[in-house]
């Protein structure tokens, strides 16, 4: 019986470790696109458009191009591992990796 208990303990620990590694890997691989519609008001977060979860840099850039259409005064960023936080300055987005 003791041997069975040890096996279940090892399996449970392996599942927990696998869960956390999977969560980290999944979050790392998700891209977020941010479209700034007007460079003159880029600091105004209410004018930003944030993408749904995307799974590659190429997919992010395609989303940006689809959103931008024919606007000429715009910018964007594609980032990984983004999360939104609320602090004393208001809502802030923090990302691990940022590409353009």
Image (cartoon, rainbow, N blue to C red):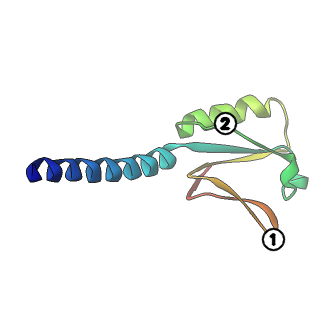
- Residue nearer the viewer, 67 or 55: 55
- The picture places residue 54, in percent across and down from the top left corner, at 58, 36
Neighbours of disc 2 within 10 Å: few (<14), some (14-19), many (20+)? few
In the image, which is nearer the foreground, mark 1 or mark 2? Answer: 1
Q: Residue drawn at (17%, 51%), measured in percent from left and top?
A: 5
- The picture places residue 89, in percent across and down from the top left corner, at 82, 69
- Horizontally, residue 1 falls left or right of residue 11, namely left
Q: How far apart are marks 1 and 2 (CA)?
A: 26 Å
- The picture places residue 66, in percent across and down from the top left corner, at 73, 28
Neighbours of disc 1 within 10 Å: few (<14), some (14-19), many (20+)? few
Q: Residue drawn at (9%, 48%), measured in percent from left and top?
A: 1
Task: Name the residue tied to disc 2.
Answer: 52
- Residue nearer the viewer, 54 or 25: 25
Where is 7 relative to 70, above or below?
below
- Residue nearer the viewer, 22 or 16: 16
Where is 93 relative to 23, above or below?
below
- Horizontally, residue 38 falls left or right of residue 50, namely right
Q: What element carries label 2?
A: loop
- Residue 45's disc number: none
- Horizontally, residue 72 falls left or right of residue 100, namely right
Whichever of callouts 1 and 2 sits on the residue coming sooner in the sequence is 2
Q: What element carries label 1?
A: loop
Task: Name the residue tied to disc 1.
Answer: 88
Q: Quadrant of residue 83?
A: bottom right
Q: Residue drawn at (63%, 44%), measured in percent from left and top?
A: 32
Q: Quadrant of residue 88?
A: bottom right
- Residue nearer the viewer, 97 or 10: 10
Farthest residue to the right: give it: 40
């Amino acid at each position: 019986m003791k041997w069975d208990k040890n096996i279940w303990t090892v399996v449970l620990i392996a599942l927990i470790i696998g869960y956390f590694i999977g969560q980290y890997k999944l979050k790392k691989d998700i891209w977020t696109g941010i479209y700034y519609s007007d460079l003159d008001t880029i600091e105004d977060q209410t004018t930003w458009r944030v993408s749904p979860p995307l799974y590659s840099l190429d997919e992010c850039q395609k989303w940006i191009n689809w959103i931008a259409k024919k606007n000429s005064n715009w910018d964007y960023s594609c980032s990984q591992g983004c999360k939104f936080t609320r602090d004393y300055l208001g809502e802030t987005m923090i990302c691990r990796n940022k590409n353009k």
